[in-house]
């Protein structure tokens, strides 16, 4: 069946996580993605763990492979003019190009949106930055995890009243930036399909993160108080938390979202004598006694495994679920039921399981998975078969280190 | 924009998006598509249900913040009255669906199933429509009726357990969600992407498509590195720092952290050797850094407990902004830990156009909120002001969409 982006060709100059995750999604959605890599200074993620079976190697990183399914790999040393010309020839035949180098680096390769547009007037190009491509800090270097600190997200993440949390799981900034880039590319593609017009789009990782904490800015403006960490507490819901369960460091999340939820909750979960006080019928009354309520909830959850507590609450139509460890995710029946996990047969590391994406298309096309490419695996296919580079010229460029 | 400079076109001008939402995810997706120029129509029961869906803080202060949040989420949309259990609701929805391009729905499925208005039934009844359904864990039978909540999505998607690193006492330090409503907003962003993917697919096939967006799966998709630690090396879950919730040391390769300083905290990451060397230059090339045991990245990581006191000693003499700029001069990804107040005052943000001011309509404070998440050079994303009253555009929309079925 037809995939949403069949017929779209992407030239991917990005690296690390945000760009590659975005282009992996484009590939899974049917686009042909040509990843331009450096064989000299390889993507840092090819050099980062986890390595298959604990053995280091360029073709063994699960981190890299989990971000680069459904792509072709071409190795060009973009510092060399001949490589730059080959990159231009790829873009001439593409719909989308993207890069996420440090500010100014792409121009040092004599590559730019303007140059791409000259050869492909309707090209869509995405460029990312850490803090934005304008302003005094536009050339500041960035990695995703510490950027959560700059954006304000770390300042509101942590136990209630405690210090900011040093880590938001899931390499949060990079993945959020990837989906933000995806949104921009798809919008630009829609515009191009309607008008024939390409365009340049830019996004910053900092803005991608700050965009998703509007309540914090509103709270600051309306209350005049700078918000800090509040753990799992919610200003409009109670009980609302992650509670201890039976087992070693096991926890269950519970969100009683309104007064109807509370009425069902207190029928299910036995509490102290004041549990049925009319003063608790409204959320304001419950918030006033939050700590006492949380203690009573914890006494109940602490006597049963998280899955059991969650099941009982779900049966009462209350939102609840275990705080999943990675091994729980791998065994999760709901993720399995939607074929969340992707498997690829890799020439060097064999069949491996990787995380998928957040949506399915019921009754529609299914994802087809191609293994993450070996470094330069598609040099011949892309440069000779597709671009038409004469074989002898290909060999010469390999010797010159242009294709490397 | 002046009269001589017509406004650039909007990417989704002329597209109709129906937003049948009960939470932030659907509302945020609608906001993103509205900013691209789509006509977004809220399908809602009444004003009270709109406000209750966002679970506001009780009291007058909560009401003021809710007004602002509604402006943020619903500015520029239209509103049509629709009560799913009222007579004629099904016919009205299918009538609208046959004429619209996209339906965003994140309502509890039990309610929709009972009314014969499940996403599957709507997709079947409106074959040209792109239907994007957002749930906690999916549309399949085992998950279908699980009630969604932002907190629970973080929990069952692995984010909550993975977030606190090096916790001081696991027995009293629960897993936590990131601040705000990250799962909801992320699901909204993904739903907006799915709407656009659906339009691409429709262009290729001539048919609409149902998209099943699960907040749990989105969160789990962000955990791909942790998952790969299991499937590639059989190890326990970890992150790039190796600093898991329970164990301060492990198999990571990247030194990073959040370091207390004179006026707060600063954050850094030193993945590459040159970044570590830059960090040491920032710290004045200290003697301890020349210790042979600290020259290899994996060794440094294993010996972080020895290194950290040196960081703390140096850091308490410096402010976060001093470290920020000095580190960046040395090409190290170093950032101050800002509050939202500090971020709004930051010169980089002052120089940009990311934050926009909400209209003062009914608000007693100047409220600056995030604006465009992507900057397009031809079709700019625009924040649209003006919140509709619930049902305000019922007659207008129904009559304007009665002209014919989209096909």
Image (tube, coloured by chain):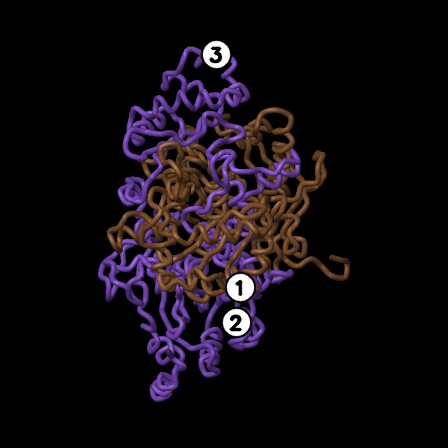
Chain colours: A purple, B brown
Q: Residue at x 50, y 57 (%)?
A: A181
Q: Are marks 3 and 1 in contact (CB under 8 Å)?
A: no
Q: Is residue B392 visible?
A: no
The residue labelled by disc 3 is A277
Q: Residue at x 58, y 49 (%)?
A: B38
Q: Position of residue A116 (x, y in %)?
A: 54, 73
Q: Label 2: chain?
A: A
Q: Residue at x 50, y 59 (%)?
A: B333
Q: Position of residue B15 (x, y in %)?
A: 56, 50
Q: Position of residue B23 (x, y in %)?
A: 51, 35
Circle 2: is it few (<14), some (14-19), or many (20+) Cα within 10 Å? some
Q: Position of residue B3 (x, y in %)?
A: 77, 58
Q: Residue at x 24, y 66 (%)?
A: A347
Q: Which mark is residue A127?
A: 1
Q: Is residue A251 above or below residue A264?
A: below
Q: Label 1: chain?
A: A
Nearest-to-viewer mark from 3 and 1: 3
| Nearer to me, B203 or A98 | A98
Instruction: State which tag comes first along the sequence, 1 or 2.
Output: 2
| Nearer to me, B13 or B124 | B13
* Label 2: which secondary element: helix
Q: Are marks 1 and 2 in contact (CB under 8 Å)?
A: yes
Which quarter of the rendering shows the N terminus of chain B? bottom right
Q: Is residue A256 above or below residue A13?
A: above
């Amino acid at each position: 069946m037809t995939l949403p982006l069949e017929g779209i060709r992407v030239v991917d100059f990005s690296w690390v996580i945000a760009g590659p995750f975005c282009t992996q999604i484009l590939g899974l959605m049917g686009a042909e993605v040509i990843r331009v890599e450096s064989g000299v200074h390889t993507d840092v993620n090819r050099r980062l763990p986890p390595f298959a079976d604990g053995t280091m190697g360029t073709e063994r990183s699960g981190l890299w492979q989990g971000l680069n399914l459904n792509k072709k790999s071409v190795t060009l040393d973009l510092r060399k003019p001949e490589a730059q010309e080959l990159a231009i020839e790829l873009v001439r035949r593409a719909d989308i190009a993207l890069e996420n180098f440090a500010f100014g680096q792409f121009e040092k390769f004599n590559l730019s949106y303007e140059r791409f547009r000259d050869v492909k007037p309707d090209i869509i190009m995405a460029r990312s930055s850490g803090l934005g491509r304008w302003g005094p800090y536009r050339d500041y270097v960035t990695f995703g995890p510490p950027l959560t600190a700059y954006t304000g997200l770390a300042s509101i993440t942590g136990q209630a009243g405690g210090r900011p949390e040093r880590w938001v799981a899931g390499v949060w900034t990079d993945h959020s930036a990837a989906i933000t880039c995806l949104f921009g590319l798809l919008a630009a593609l829609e515009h191009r399909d309607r008008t024939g017009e390409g365009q340049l789009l830019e996004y910053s990782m900092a803005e991608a993160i700050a965009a998703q904490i509007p309540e914090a800015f509103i709270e600051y403006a309306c209350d005049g108080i700078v918000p800090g960490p509040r753990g799992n507490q919610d200003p409009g819901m109670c009980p609302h938390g992650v509670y201890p369960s039976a087992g070693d460091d096991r926890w269950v999340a519970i969100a009683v979202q309104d007064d109807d939820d509370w009425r069902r909750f207190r029928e299910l979960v036995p509490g102290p004598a004041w549990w049925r006080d009319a003063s608790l019928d409204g959320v304001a009354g419950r918030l006033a006694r939050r700590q006492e309520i949380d203690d009573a909830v914890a006494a109940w959850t602490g006597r049963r495994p998280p899955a059991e507590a969650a099941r009982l609450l779900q049966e009462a139509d209350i939102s609840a679920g275990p705080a999943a460890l990675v091994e729980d995710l791998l065994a999760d029946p709901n993720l399995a039921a939607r074929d969340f996990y992707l498997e690829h047969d890799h020439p060097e590391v064999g069949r491996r399981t990787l995380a998928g994406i957040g949506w399915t298309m019921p009754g529609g096309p299914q994802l087809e998975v191609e293994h993450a490419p070996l470094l330069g695996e598609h040099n011949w296919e892309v440069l000779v078969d597709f671009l038409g580079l004469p074989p002898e010229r290909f060999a010469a460029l390999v010797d010159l280190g242009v294709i490397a | 924009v002046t009269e001589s400079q017509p406004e650039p076109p909007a990417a989704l001008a002329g597209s109709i998006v129906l937003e049948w939402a009960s939470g932030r995810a659907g509302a945020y997706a609608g906001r993103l598509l509205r900013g691209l120029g789509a006509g977004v129509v809220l399908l809602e029961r009444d004003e009270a249900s709109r406000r209750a869906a966002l679970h506001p803080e009780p009291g007058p202060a909560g009401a003021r913040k809710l007004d602002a949040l509604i402006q943020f989420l619903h500015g520029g949309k239209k509103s049509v009255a629709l009560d799913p259990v009222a007579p004629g609701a099904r016919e009205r929805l299918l009538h609208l669906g046959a004429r619209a391009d996209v339906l965003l729905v994140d309502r509890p499925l039990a309610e929709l199933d009972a009314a014969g208005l499940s996403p599957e039934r709507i997709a079947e009844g409106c074959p040209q429509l792109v239907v994007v359904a957002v749930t906690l864990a999916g549309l399949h039978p085992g998950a279908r009726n699980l009630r969604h909540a932002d907190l629970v999505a973080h929990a069952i998607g692995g984010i909550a357990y993975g977030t606190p690193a090096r916790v001081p006492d696991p027995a009293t330090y629960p897993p936590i969600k990131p601040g705000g409503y990250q799962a909801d907003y992320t699901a909204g962003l993904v739903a907006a992407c799915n709407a656009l993917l659906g339009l691409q697919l429709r262009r290729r096939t001539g048919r609409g498509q149902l998209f099943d967006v699960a907040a749990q799966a989105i969160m789990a998709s962000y955990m791909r590195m942790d998952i790969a630690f299991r499937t590639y090396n059989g190890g326990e879950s970890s992150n790039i720092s190796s600093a898991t919730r329970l164990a301060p040391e492990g198999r990571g390769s990247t030194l990073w952290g959040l370091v207390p300083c004179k006026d707060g905290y600063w954050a850094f990451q030193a993945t590459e050797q040159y970044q570590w060397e830059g960090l040491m230059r920032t710290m004045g090339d200290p003697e301890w850094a020349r210790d042979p045991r600290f020259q290899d990245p994996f060794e440094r990581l294993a010996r972080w407990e020895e290194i950290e006191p040196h960081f703390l000693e140096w850091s308490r003499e410096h402010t976060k902004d001093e470290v920020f700029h000095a580190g960046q001069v040395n090409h190290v990804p170093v950032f101050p830990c800002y509050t939202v107040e500090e971020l709004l005052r930051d010169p980089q943000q002052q120089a940009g156009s990311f934050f926009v001011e909400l209209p003062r309509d009914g608000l007693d404070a100047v409220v600056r909120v995030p604006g465009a998440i992507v900057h397009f050079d031809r079709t700019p994303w625009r924040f649209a002001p003006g919140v509709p009253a619930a049902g305000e555009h019922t007659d207008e929309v129904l009559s304007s969409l009665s002209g014919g079925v989209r096909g």
